[in-house]
Protein backbone atom coordinates (compact mmCIF):
# COMPACT_ATOMS: atom_id res chain seq x y z
CA UNK A 1 0.00 0.00 0.00
CA UNK A 2 1.38 3.39 -1.04
CA UNK A 3 0.30 6.79 0.21
CA UNK A 4 1.06 6.49 3.94
CA UNK A 5 3.36 9.53 4.08
CA UNK A 6 2.36 13.21 4.14
CA UNK A 7 4.69 16.17 3.67
CA UNK A 8 7.97 16.99 1.92
CA UNK A 9 10.42 18.15 4.61
CA UNK A 10 8.27 17.82 7.73
CA UNK A 11 7.00 14.33 6.96
CA UNK A 12 4.60 12.03 8.74
CA UNK A 13 4.26 8.33 7.99
CA UNK A 14 1.49 6.49 9.85
CA UNK A 15 0.88 2.80 10.40
CA UNK A 16 -1.58 0.45 12.08
CA UNK A 17 -5.22 -0.59 11.91
CA UNK A 18 -8.29 0.20 13.97
CA UNK A 19 -8.37 -3.20 15.70
CA UNK A 20 -4.68 -4.05 15.63
CA UNK A 21 -2.32 -3.96 18.61
CA UNK A 22 -1.49 -0.29 18.09
CA UNK A 23 -1.39 2.59 15.66
CA UNK A 24 1.55 4.92 15.33
CA UNK A 25 3.74 7.12 13.24
CA UNK A 26 7.19 8.35 12.33
CA UNK A 27 7.86 12.08 12.01
CA UNK A 28 10.89 12.87 9.89
CA UNK A 29 12.41 16.32 9.40
CA UNK A 30 11.53 17.91 12.72
CA UNK A 31 14.42 20.22 13.70
CA UNK A 32 16.49 19.34 16.75
CA UNK A 33 16.32 21.31 19.97
CA UNK A 34 12.56 21.91 19.96
CA UNK A 35 11.31 21.82 23.54
CA UNK A 36 8.13 19.74 23.52
CA UNK A 37 5.22 20.22 25.88
CA UNK A 38 4.22 16.56 26.15
CA UNK A 39 1.08 17.40 28.12
CA UNK A 40 -0.09 19.69 25.32
CA UNK A 41 0.39 16.86 22.81
CA UNK A 42 -1.67 14.51 24.97
CA UNK A 43 -4.34 17.17 25.38
CA UNK A 44 -4.73 17.37 21.60
CA UNK A 45 -5.27 13.60 21.54
CA UNK A 46 -7.82 13.91 24.32
CA UNK A 47 -9.81 16.32 22.15
CA UNK A 48 -9.98 13.70 19.38
CA UNK A 49 -10.36 10.49 21.37
CA UNK A 50 -13.61 8.47 21.37
CA UNK A 51 -15.96 8.20 24.34
CA UNK A 52 -15.60 11.82 25.44
CA UNK A 53 -19.33 12.70 25.31
CA UNK A 54 -22.75 11.24 24.61
CA UNK A 55 -22.81 12.59 21.04
CA UNK A 56 -19.77 10.61 19.85
CA UNK A 57 -18.82 6.94 19.66
CA UNK A 58 -18.68 5.22 23.04
CA UNK A 59 -15.52 3.26 22.29
CA UNK A 60 -13.36 4.09 25.32
CA UNK A 61 -9.73 4.45 24.33
CA UNK A 62 -7.25 6.34 26.54
CA UNK A 63 -5.25 7.25 23.41
CA UNK A 64 -2.05 7.67 25.38
CA UNK A 65 0.90 8.45 23.11
CA UNK A 66 4.26 6.82 23.81
CA UNK A 67 7.36 8.27 22.16
CA UNK A 68 9.95 5.63 21.35
CA UNK A 69 12.58 7.69 19.50
CA UNK A 70 13.60 11.20 18.52
CA UNK A 71 12.79 12.83 21.87
CA UNK A 72 15.20 13.01 24.83
CA UNK A 73 14.37 14.91 28.02
CA UNK A 74 11.47 16.56 26.16
CA UNK A 75 13.80 17.92 23.45
CA UNK A 76 13.68 16.78 19.83
CA UNK A 77 17.01 15.28 18.78
CA UNK A 78 16.66 15.79 15.02
CA UNK A 79 16.31 12.04 14.43
CA UNK A 80 13.02 10.44 13.36
CA UNK A 81 10.36 10.77 16.05
CA UNK A 82 8.65 7.42 16.49
CA UNK A 83 5.48 7.01 18.54
CA UNK A 84 2.73 4.49 19.22
CA UNK A 85 -0.82 4.64 20.55
CA UNK A 86 -2.11 1.31 21.82
CA UNK A 87 -5.57 0.02 20.94
CA UNK A 88 -7.11 -1.17 24.21
CA UNK A 89 -10.87 -1.38 23.65
CA UNK A 90 -11.38 -3.29 20.40
CA UNK A 91 -14.63 -5.24 20.01
CA UNK A 92 -13.90 -7.03 16.77
CA UNK A 93 -16.93 -9.32 17.15
CA UNK A 94 -19.09 -6.25 16.44
CA UNK A 95 -17.90 -6.53 12.84
CA UNK A 96 -18.29 -10.28 12.23
CA UNK A 97 -21.59 -9.64 10.43
CA UNK A 98 -19.79 -7.69 7.67
CA UNK A 99 -17.01 -10.19 7.02
CA UNK A 100 -18.51 -11.03 3.63
CA UNK A 101 -20.59 -7.88 3.15
CA UNK A 102 -19.65 -4.48 1.71
CA UNK A 103 -21.08 -1.62 3.75
CA UNK A 104 -22.63 1.19 1.67
CA UNK A 105 -20.37 4.25 1.24
CA UNK A 106 -17.46 2.60 3.06
CA UNK A 107 -14.04 1.54 1.74
CA UNK A 108 -14.91 -2.17 2.03
CA UNK A 109 -15.58 -2.81 -1.65
CA UNK A 110 -12.74 -0.69 -3.05
CA UNK A 111 -10.15 -2.08 -0.60
CA UNK A 112 -11.01 -5.68 -1.41
CA UNK A 113 -11.03 -5.10 -5.16
CA UNK A 114 -7.72 -3.19 -5.04
CA UNK A 115 -5.76 -5.36 -2.59
CA UNK A 116 -7.57 -8.71 -2.81
CA UNK A 117 -8.19 -8.68 0.94
CA UNK A 118 -9.38 -6.37 3.69
CA UNK A 119 -9.41 -6.08 7.45
CA UNK A 120 -13.14 -5.86 8.12
CA UNK A 121 -12.65 -5.14 11.85
CA UNK A 122 -13.62 -1.50 12.12
CA UNK A 123 -12.43 -0.84 8.59
CA UNK A 124 -8.80 -1.69 9.35
CA UNK A 125 -6.50 0.86 7.75
CA UNK A 126 -9.41 2.87 6.33
CA UNK A 127 -10.71 3.61 9.83
CA UNK A 128 -10.66 7.19 11.08
CA UNK A 129 -8.73 5.87 14.08
CA UNK A 130 -5.61 6.47 11.96
CA UNK A 131 -6.18 10.21 12.39
CA UNK A 132 -4.98 10.02 16.00
CA UNK A 133 -1.46 9.73 14.55
CA UNK A 134 -2.00 12.94 12.58
CA UNK A 135 -3.05 14.73 15.76
CA UNK A 136 0.24 13.77 17.47
CA UNK A 137 2.30 15.07 14.56
CA UNK A 138 0.14 18.16 14.24
CA UNK A 139 0.59 18.94 17.92
CA UNK A 140 4.37 18.90 17.44
CA UNK A 141 4.03 21.06 14.32
CA UNK A 142 1.98 23.56 16.34
CA UNK A 143 4.83 23.85 18.83
CA UNK A 144 7.29 24.41 15.99
CA UNK A 145 5.01 27.22 14.77
CA UNK A 146 4.48 28.79 18.18
CA UNK A 147 3.64 32.27 16.82
CA UNK A 148 0.89 31.04 14.50
CA UNK A 149 -2.63 30.67 15.89
CA UNK A 150 -4.64 27.73 14.55
CA UNK A 151 -8.31 27.60 15.55
CA UNK A 152 -10.94 25.27 14.11
CA UNK A 153 -14.56 25.03 15.21
CA UNK A 154 -17.88 23.49 14.23
CA UNK A 155 -19.66 25.92 11.92
CA UNK A 156 -22.65 23.79 10.93
CA UNK A 157 -24.45 20.56 11.73
CA UNK A 158 -26.97 19.58 9.09
CA UNK A 159 -29.09 22.66 8.43
CA UNK A 160 -28.02 24.44 11.62
CA UNK A 161 -25.40 27.09 10.83
CA UNK A 162 -23.29 29.37 12.99
CA UNK A 163 -24.22 32.68 11.41
CA UNK A 164 -21.60 34.89 13.06
CA UNK A 165 -18.39 35.68 11.14
CA UNK A 166 -15.26 34.24 12.71
CA UNK A 167 -14.05 37.74 13.63
CA UNK A 168 -16.98 38.01 16.08
CA UNK A 169 -16.20 34.72 17.84
CA UNK A 170 -14.26 34.03 21.00
CA UNK A 171 -12.21 30.93 20.14
CA UNK A 172 -11.61 30.26 23.83
CA UNK A 173 -15.26 29.14 24.01
CA UNK A 174 -14.81 26.38 21.42
CA UNK A 175 -14.03 23.78 24.10
CA UNK A 176 -16.88 24.96 26.37
CA UNK A 177 -19.37 22.53 24.82
CA UNK A 178 -19.24 19.00 23.43
CA UNK A 179 -19.99 20.00 19.84
CA UNK A 180 -17.09 22.50 19.81
CA UNK A 181 -19.00 25.50 18.51
CA UNK A 182 -17.83 28.82 20.04
CA UNK A 183 -21.40 30.12 20.34
CA UNK A 184 -23.37 28.42 23.09
CA UNK A 185 -26.82 29.20 21.70
CA UNK A 186 -25.98 27.66 18.33
CA UNK A 187 -24.15 24.81 20.06
CA UNK A 188 -27.26 23.83 22.01
CA UNK A 189 -29.23 23.55 18.78
CA UNK A 190 -26.49 21.47 17.18
CA UNK A 191 -26.31 19.10 20.14
CA UNK A 192 -30.10 18.61 20.12
CA UNK A 193 -29.95 17.88 16.39
CA UNK A 194 -27.26 15.22 16.82
CA UNK A 195 -29.11 13.57 19.73
CA UNK A 196 -32.32 13.44 17.69
CA UNK A 197 -30.52 11.91 14.71
CA UNK A 198 -28.84 9.35 16.99
CA UNK A 199 -32.23 8.24 18.39
CA UNK A 200 -33.33 7.55 14.82
CA UNK A 201 -30.35 5.25 14.30
CA UNK A 202 -29.08 7.67 11.67
CA UNK A 203 -26.12 10.03 11.24
CA UNK A 204 -25.60 13.60 10.08
CA UNK A 205 -22.82 15.70 8.57
CA UNK A 206 -21.61 19.24 8.99
CA UNK A 207 -18.77 21.68 8.42
CA UNK A 208 -15.64 22.75 10.23
CA UNK A 209 -14.20 26.23 9.78
CA UNK A 210 -10.51 26.81 10.48
CA UNK A 211 -8.73 30.14 10.93
CA UNK A 212 -4.94 30.54 10.70
CA UNK A 213 -3.63 33.81 12.12
CA UNK A 214 -0.17 35.41 12.30
CA UNK A 215 0.96 33.39 9.29
CA UNK A 216 4.01 35.14 7.83
CA UNK A 217 4.07 36.37 4.25
CA UNK A 218 5.69 33.96 1.83
CA UNK A 219 4.54 30.42 2.67
CA UNK A 220 3.66 28.44 -0.44
CA UNK A 221 5.48 27.29 -3.55
CA UNK A 222 3.92 27.97 -6.96
CA UNK A 223 3.18 26.43 -9.39
CA UNK A 224 2.05 22.98 -8.27
CA UNK A 225 2.67 23.37 -4.53
CA UNK A 226 0.44 26.33 -3.83
CA UNK A 227 -0.40 26.80 -0.15
CA UNK A 228 -4.13 26.44 -0.70
CA UNK A 229 -3.60 23.36 -2.87
CA UNK A 230 -1.69 21.60 -0.10
CA UNK A 231 -4.26 22.68 2.48
CA UNK A 232 -6.95 21.26 0.23
CA UNK A 233 -5.13 17.95 -0.13
CA UNK A 234 -4.56 17.80 3.62
CA UNK A 235 -8.22 18.33 4.42
CA UNK A 236 -9.52 16.02 1.70
CA UNK A 237 -7.26 13.26 3.04
CA UNK A 238 -9.27 13.22 6.29
CA UNK A 239 -11.89 10.49 6.54
CA UNK A 240 -15.44 11.58 5.61
CA UNK A 241 -14.39 14.91 4.07
CA UNK A 242 -16.35 15.76 0.92
CA UNK A 243 -15.43 19.38 0.26
CA UNK A 244 -12.94 22.18 0.86
CA UNK A 245 -13.13 25.91 0.17
CA UNK A 246 -10.98 28.83 1.29
CA UNK A 247 -11.50 32.56 1.24
CA UNK A 248 -14.61 33.51 -0.72
CA UNK A 249 -14.81 29.92 -1.97
CA UNK A 250 -17.75 29.09 -4.19
CA UNK A 251 -19.45 32.37 -3.27
CA UNK A 252 -16.65 34.15 -5.16
CA UNK A 253 -17.87 32.57 -8.39
CA UNK A 254 -20.99 34.73 -8.18
CA UNK A 255 -19.11 38.01 -7.78
CA UNK A 256 -17.57 40.51 -10.16
CA UNK A 257 -13.88 41.34 -10.07
CA UNK A 258 -14.55 44.87 -8.86
CA UNK A 259 -16.34 43.49 -5.80
CA UNK A 260 -13.98 40.59 -5.21
CA UNK A 261 -10.60 42.30 -5.44
CA UNK A 262 -8.84 42.91 -2.12
CA UNK A 263 -7.51 46.48 -2.31
CA UNK A 264 -4.20 47.23 -0.64
CA UNK A 265 -3.39 49.37 2.37
CA UNK A 266 -0.06 51.18 2.44
CA UNK A 267 1.51 48.54 4.71
CA UNK A 268 0.73 45.71 2.28
CA UNK A 269 -2.31 44.43 4.15
CA UNK A 270 -5.65 44.48 2.35
CA UNK A 271 -8.91 46.27 3.09
CA UNK A 272 -10.90 43.06 2.57
CA UNK A 273 -9.79 39.45 2.64
CA UNK A 274 -11.83 37.54 0.09
CA UNK A 275 -8.54 35.95 -1.02
CA UNK A 276 -8.49 34.13 2.29
CA UNK A 277 -4.92 35.14 3.11
CA UNK A 278 -3.44 33.47 0.03
CA UNK A 279 -2.60 35.08 -3.30
CA UNK A 280 -0.77 33.34 -6.12
CA UNK A 281 -0.55 30.28 -3.88
CA UNK A 282 1.51 32.24 -1.31
CA UNK A 283 0.43 33.53 2.10
CA UNK A 284 0.07 37.32 2.16
CA UNK A 285 0.02 37.89 5.92
CA UNK A 286 -3.75 38.19 6.26
CA UNK A 287 -5.85 35.62 8.09
CA UNK A 288 -6.16 32.33 6.24
CA UNK A 289 -9.61 30.84 6.65
CA UNK A 290 -11.22 27.80 5.09
CA UNK A 291 -14.17 25.47 5.48
CA UNK A 292 -14.25 21.68 5.37
CA UNK A 293 -17.40 19.64 4.68
CA UNK A 294 -17.90 16.28 6.40
CA UNK A 295 -20.44 13.75 5.16
CA UNK A 296 -22.74 11.81 7.50
CA UNK A 297 -21.00 8.78 9.00
CA UNK A 298 -21.64 5.85 6.66
CA UNK A 299 -22.49 3.28 9.35
CA UNK A 300 -26.11 3.71 10.44
CA UNK A 301 -28.16 1.58 12.83
CA UNK A 302 -30.88 1.05 10.24
CA UNK A 303 -31.50 -1.79 7.81
CA UNK A 304 -30.20 -1.21 4.29
CA UNK A 305 -29.71 -3.30 1.19
CA UNK A 306 -26.11 -3.86 0.15
CA UNK A 307 -23.80 -6.17 -1.81
CA UNK A 308 -22.02 -9.24 -0.49
CA UNK A 309 -18.78 -10.80 -1.76
CA UNK A 310 -20.74 -13.37 -3.79
CA UNK A 311 -22.52 -10.67 -5.78
CA UNK A 312 -25.86 -10.91 -3.99
CA UNK A 313 -27.95 -7.99 -2.77
CA UNK A 314 -28.56 -8.65 0.92
CA UNK A 315 -30.00 -6.81 3.90
CA UNK A 316 -27.67 -5.57 6.63
CA UNK A 317 -27.85 -3.39 9.71
CA UNK A 318 -24.97 -1.48 11.28
CA UNK A 319 -23.76 -2.58 14.70
CA UNK A 320 -21.10 -1.51 17.15
CA UNK A 321 -20.01 1.89 18.45
CA UNK A 322 -20.07 4.69 15.91
CA UNK A 323 -20.26 8.48 15.84
CA UNK A 324 -23.70 9.87 14.96
CA UNK A 325 -21.72 12.91 13.75
CA UNK A 326 -17.98 13.00 13.17
CA UNK A 327 -17.64 16.79 13.20
CA UNK A 328 -16.99 17.46 16.93
CA UNK A 329 -14.04 15.02 17.03
CA UNK A 330 -12.73 16.30 13.69
CA UNK A 331 -11.80 19.73 15.05
CA UNK A 332 -8.31 18.75 16.33
CA UNK A 333 -7.72 16.70 13.16
CA UNK A 334 -8.37 19.71 10.93
CA UNK A 335 -6.06 21.83 13.09
CA UNK A 336 -3.38 19.14 13.00
CA UNK A 337 -3.41 18.81 9.21
CA UNK A 338 -3.26 22.60 8.81
CA UNK A 339 -0.27 22.68 11.17
CA UNK A 340 1.51 19.95 9.18
CA UNK A 341 1.09 21.93 5.96
CA UNK A 342 2.36 25.16 7.52
CA UNK A 343 5.31 23.41 9.18
CA UNK A 344 6.31 21.89 5.86
CA UNK A 345 6.28 25.24 4.07
CA UNK A 346 8.02 26.90 7.01
CA UNK A 347 10.95 24.51 6.62
CA UNK A 348 10.88 24.75 2.81
CA UNK A 349 11.25 28.53 3.16
CA UNK A 350 14.35 28.05 5.30
CA UNK A 351 15.91 25.85 2.64
CA UNK A 352 14.84 27.46 -0.64
CA UNK A 353 13.84 31.06 0.02
Image (cartoon, grey):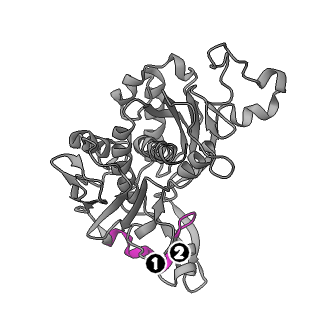
Q: Is residue 329 above or below residue 151?
A: below
Q: Is residue 174 above or below residue 30?
A: above
**Above-or-below relation of 91 to 248:** below
From the viewer's perspective, tell me whether residue 105 is left or right of residue 351: right
Q: Position of residue 328 (x, y in %)?
A: 42, 40
Nearest the eye: 18 or 95? 18
| SS at badge 1 | loop
Locate residue 111 relative to residue 150 in the image: left or right: right
Foreground residue among 13 and 152: 13
Q: What's the magenta region?
A: 93-107
Question: Residue 339, image x and y in percent?
Answer: 44, 42
Residue identifier under label 1: 118
Q: Write down the residue under mark 2.
A: 111
User: Does the segment drawn in magenta span residue 318?
Assistant: no
Mark 1 near mark 2, Cβ–Cβ under 8 Å?
yes
Q: In the rendered view, does 86 fall on the left or right side of 326?
A: left
Looking at the image, how many numbered discs can be counted on the residues? Answer: 2
Q: Residue at x 43, y 19 (%)?
A: 170
At mark 2, the secondary structure is helix
- Dot 2: few (<14), some (14–19), or many (≥20) neighbours within 10 Å? some
Who comes first in sequence, dot 1 or dot 2?
2
Q: Residues within 10 Å of mark 1 (few under 14, many from 20)?
A: some
Q: Residue furthest top?
A: 266
Q: Residue at x 43, y 34 (%)?
A: 191
- Counting from the top left corner in percent of width and height, residue 314 is at 56, 76
x, y percent for residue 178:
36, 34
- Residue 103 colored in magenta in the image: yes
Amino acid sequence: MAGNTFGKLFKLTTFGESHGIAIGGIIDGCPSGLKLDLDAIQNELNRRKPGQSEIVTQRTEPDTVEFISGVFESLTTGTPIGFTIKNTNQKSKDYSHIKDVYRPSHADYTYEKKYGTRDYRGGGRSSARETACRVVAGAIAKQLLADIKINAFTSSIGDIFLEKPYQALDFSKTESNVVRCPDNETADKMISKIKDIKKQGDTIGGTVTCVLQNVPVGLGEPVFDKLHADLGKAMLSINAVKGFEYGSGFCGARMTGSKHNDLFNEDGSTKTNLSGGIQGGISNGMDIYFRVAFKPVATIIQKQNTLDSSGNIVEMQGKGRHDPCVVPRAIPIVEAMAALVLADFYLINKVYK
